[in-house]
Image: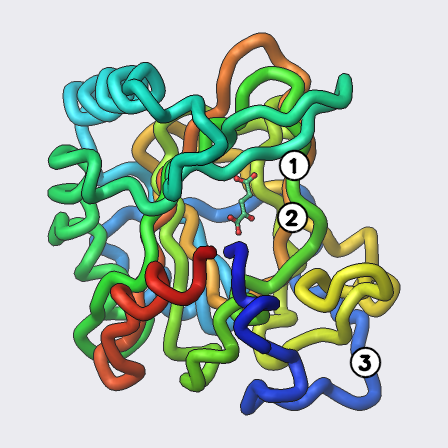
């Protein structure tokens, strides 16, 4: 997500307009997030379009998740993976003031296992159902939130890629859980129902959302189990907290574009990351 600023990506350039007046909607009361079976495509699509996100119960087996965990361990131990100078390695602050490697972005060129997963029909068929057409991979990353690593302030992914010039509703991100996520280890949190527009930017960072326009009581923590898919719209405001546990929290993210929005993979990684 780095680099868009350097390229002049600006909220004003997006085709989305700020909603006026700003609505603090509360669409999904209560802490329970429905998890749909992977073949319940109509229910999945209905929740996605209504709330801007949806959870699909794991369509994967234990052996596959075990293979992903081994692959995460292999990648995290590769020479260079802990080097800030590596193109694919991004750093993040910790609670005690350190800066540590937190993500491999991209990841599939380093990982045949995750490359295959990004093309897995159990994921693609859901992405196609939600976008209503064939899809193409836009971005892929592995986030390893190690103990003590901070989370993310509220943002809409689209604000980082608006400069590419396609509408926000033509992209979604699918997070594939390698580990169980909980409030304690930094599960993703979403603000349901705000996926129709770009929200006003935070005063200190144009790529983050001004949280004062959101109802703080409407935020939903989305805990997931290994293999679950948390799918969110490119305009869905989301955030996460630090990992307060003693184990890493690992999530894969595959971002897909509707084919009609174009294949921007090479452009994004050539221009979107410094
Ligand atoms: O992994 C997390 O905690 C959040 C990641 C995220 O929000 C993002 O990459 O857009």
Q: Are marks 2 and 1 in contact (CB under 8 Å)?
A: yes
Q: Specify which label sits upstream in the sequence, 2 or 1.
A: 1
- Gap between marks 3 and 1 measured at Cα: 26 Å
Q: Nearer the viewer, residue 71 or 258?
A: 71
- Gap between marks 2 and 1 measured at Cα: 7 Å
Mark 1, residue position: 151
Which residue: 25% across, 85% down?
Answer: 260
Task: Report x, y in % for residue 23.
Answer: 79, 78
- Dot 2 beta carbon under 8 Å from ligand 1: yes
Check the image and report above or below for 139 versus 252.
Answer: below
Task: Report x, y in % for residue 34.
Answer: 48, 48
Which residue: 28% across, 76% down?
Answer: 258
Q: Nearer the viewer, mark 2 or mark 1?
A: 1
Q: Quadrant of ligand 1?
A: top right
Q: Specify which label sits upstream in the sequence, 2 or 3.
A: 3
Q: Which mark is residue 22?
A: 3
Task: Report x, y in % for residue 209.
Answer: 73, 64
Q: Nearer the viewer, mark 2 or mark 3?
A: 2
Q: Residue 147: in sight, yes or no?
A: yes
Q: Nearer the viewer, mark 3 or mark 1?
A: 1
Q: Which mark is residue 163?
A: none
Task: Report x, y in % for residue 211.
Answer: 81, 60
- Dot 1 beta carbon under 8 Å from ligand 1: yes
In this view, the residue farthest toward the front is 85
Mark 2, residue position: 239
Q: Are marks 2 and 3 in contact (CB under 8 Å)?
A: no
């Amino acid at each position: 997500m780095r680099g868009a600023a350097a390229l002049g990506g600006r909220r004003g350039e997006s085709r989305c307009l700020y909603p006026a007046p700003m609505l603090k909607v509360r669409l999904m009361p209560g802490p329970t997030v429905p998890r749909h079976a992977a073949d319940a495509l109509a229910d999945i699509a209905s929740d996605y379009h209504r709330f801007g996100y949806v959870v699909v119960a794991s369509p994967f087996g234990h052996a596959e998740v075990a293979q992903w965990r081994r692959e995460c361990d292999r990648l995290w131990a590769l020479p260079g993976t802990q080097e800030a100078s590596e193109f694919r390695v991004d750093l993040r602050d910790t609670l005690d003031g350190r800066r540590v490697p937190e993500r491999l972005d991209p990841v599939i060129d380093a990982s045949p296992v995750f490359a295959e997963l990004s093309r897995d029909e159990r994921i693609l068929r859901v992405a196609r159902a939600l976008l209503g057409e064939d899809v193409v991979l836009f971005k892929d990353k592995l986030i390893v939130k190690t103990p003590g690593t901070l989370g993310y302030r509220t943002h809409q992914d689209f604000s980082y890629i608006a400069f590419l010039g396609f509408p926000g509703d033509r992209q979604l991100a699918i997070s594939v859980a390698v580990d169980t996520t909980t409030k304690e280890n930094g599960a993703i949190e979403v603000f349901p129902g705000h996926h129709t527009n770009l929200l006003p930017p935070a005063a200190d960072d144009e790529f983050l959302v001004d949280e004062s326009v959101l109802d703080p009581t409407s935020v939903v923590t989305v805990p997931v189990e290994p293999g679950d898919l948390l799918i969110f719209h490119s305009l869905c405001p989301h955030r996460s907290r630090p990992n307060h546990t003693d184990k890493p929290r690992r999530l894969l993210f595959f971002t897909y574009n509707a084919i009609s929005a174009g294949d921007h993979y090479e452009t994004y990684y050539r221009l979107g990351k410094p």
